Amino acid sequence: MSRPGQGVMVPVNGLGFPPQNVARVVVWEWLNEHSRWRPYTATVCHHIENVLKEDARGSVVLGQVDAQLVPYIIDLQSMHQFRQDTGTMRPVRRNFYDPSSAPGKGIVWEWENDGGAWTAYDMDICITIQNAYEKQHPWLDLSSLGFCYLIYFNSMSQMNRQTRRRRRLRRRLDLAYPLTVGSIPKSQSWPVGASSGQPCSCQQCLLVNSTRAASNAILASQRRKAPPGAPPHPPPGGLPGTLPVRPSANLAGGALWAAPTVGPTEPAPPPRAPPRSPSALGSAPTAGQNNLNRPGPQRTTSVSARASIPPGVPALPVKNLNGTGPVHPALAGMTGILLCAAGLPVCLTRAPKPILHPPPVSKSDVKPVPGVPGVCRKTKKKHLKKSKNPEDVVRRYMQKVKNPPDEDCTICMERLVTASGYEGVLRHKGVRPELVGRLGRCGHMYHLLCLVAMYSNGNKDGSLQCPTCKAIYGEKTGTQPPGKMEFHLIPHSLPGFADTQTIRIVYDIPTGIQGPEHPNPGKKFTARGFPRHCYLPNNEKGRKVLRLLITAWERRLIFTIGTSNTTGESDTVVWNEIHHKTEFGSNLTGHGYPDASYLDNVLAELTAQGVSEAPAKA
């Protein structure tokens, strides 16, 4: 249909928090691995609100209303979503929107991904698109929200401004999100590291998180310091290609702003939003572009820009201090941001490059690792065995309890003396919903039906992991694609191990086709950055870690297929929660040496995967 009117470039504005004693729509959201808040469906949000009214410190079993969310539980006291079969925890929050907005009307905007499935936009993007649609704008530019996409309502499509690639989008009606009235608190969330209740303590994560918080705070303060005479909208013929800055989810080492690309072939957008105050930087910057929910549309690449220094103002050099750890470069970077926020020009020296590889080594100098037979391990494509009956697997590790105690089953959160919360959701022959069993080694008790549901949503490899203490029953295996692992000694020392030779591990996995155990069976997967080189000191503990890594490799636990946290690419080979040191002669990325706690940390990660010294085979 024809939609008259002018296109729109949306301003960057926070939704804020509503005044007290007003009606607002409640949307529960979870934080994905790309630091984007993803909304739960309206049905799930209604379920969470109902539980919240009964017990504000209780737990919400999401599988009771959505069969695809069977393994997930939300703990309302800590505001975290917990996946029972993997132990992964993610922050959640309770957010509020105007009742007249898209979630209040039950309107959902979605884009079509590469697999042909429909993915909902983030809620703030959805609301923005709906507002433009209701005002009958023919198109919508999402650049000022940090995304390099144009939405065309006439063709119901989304176009990437850089690649010109188009995707279909659609608008559908769904259940309206729940409404609440009264004093509304601010949203809260407590981000944590994956697979644990504590923030990740590796040096790389500490660097990224601390720098991200500082940069976002500074950029927010700069927006509040807009010149009093600045016009609310750019005049015709104003500075082209300038955008307000949106805090980035990541602070990269390059420029914080990206240069715009040439406009679309469809109706040309109006002039951009006004640039930031020139007092903050010598020249008008352009906005950094963020990604939508990955996998899917691509992120705009950053283009470095140099700010001109006003005459008469001395440049303040901020050097990257010498040192092997990442704290010094982080301090230099944050100092530069603070000086920039104060309106002072900053001259950052070139950051030192990480030393990823050792000096060249001749073949005659490469030796086998003492005490570890061979120099190579190969894994082939997994041959699927006859599917194991989930009931048989669960009964193998459990003892029937005739008189269970009157306490909660921590999977469904129902009392053990009552029927399982999955009664009516999951039906399984021979498993009555009131049956209760005790795990043999740790003694924790659950409904048998709950454990069957948990096992059915996992890798179904014949192993079982206690959702309470994480004890593993049986031999846990993963979904690593076929490949080769090589290991040998080289005559060079790692920082912090001056008198010790180095164990070099080389992983090599080729591209291939996903199997039935992978996210998208039959679809091609990529393998970027292979062969990957990793390093261990050749001492007693280093050799122990190597033996256990070989066992983890043979069990297909080192890598998996998923979405890259670095590039956002989906259907690609990624690390699987066992940290490796890929930086040989420095520690600028946090994945190098010296790191006094690394060997102990990786041993703990291997133990969490069920790989310990007792059953390890070299």
Image (spheres, rainbow, N blue to C red):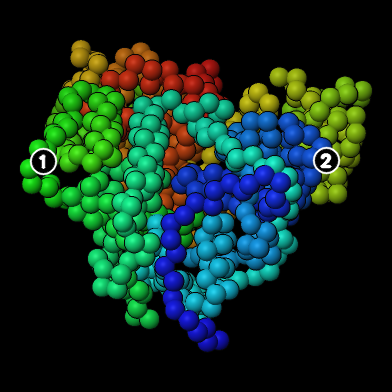
SS label for mark 1: loop
Question: On the image, numbered disc 2 is attached to which residue?
Answer: 421
Among the two numbered marks 1 and 2 on one chain, the one whose residue lies closer to the N terminus: 1
**Residue at x-position 73% and y-position 49%:** 180
Task: Name the quadrant of the N terminus.
Answer: bottom right
Percent across and percent down for residue 329 are 24, 30
Please say if 59 is above or below 101.
Answer: above
Residue 23 is left or right of residue 483, and the answer is: right
Residue drawn at point x = 36 percent, y = 65 percent: 233
The answer to whether 472 is drawn above or below residue 107 in the figure is above
Camera-nearest residue between 262 and 22: 22
Left or right: where 113 falls relative to 55? left
Question: In the rendered view of the protein, which quadrant contains the C terminus?
Answer: top left
Residue furthest toward the bottom? Answer: 2
Q: Residue furthest front?
A: 229
Q: Is residue 313 above or below residue 243?
A: above
Residue at 54% in and 48% down: 16
Q: CA distance from mark 1 to mark 2?
A: 68 Å
Viewer-nearest residue: 355 or 489: 355
Q: Looking at numbered disc 2 in the image, what kind of residue is underneath it? A: Gly
Residue 510 at x, y = what percent?
37, 51
| Horizontal side, residue 442 vs residue 606: left or right | right
Residue on which the image places disc 1: 313
Mark 1 or 2, which is nearer the eye? 1
Give the secondary structure at mark 2.
loop
- Counting from the top left corner in percent of width and height, residue 400 is at 85, 26
Q: Position of residue 560 (x, y in %)?
A: 48, 44
Q: Amino acid at mark 1?
A: Val
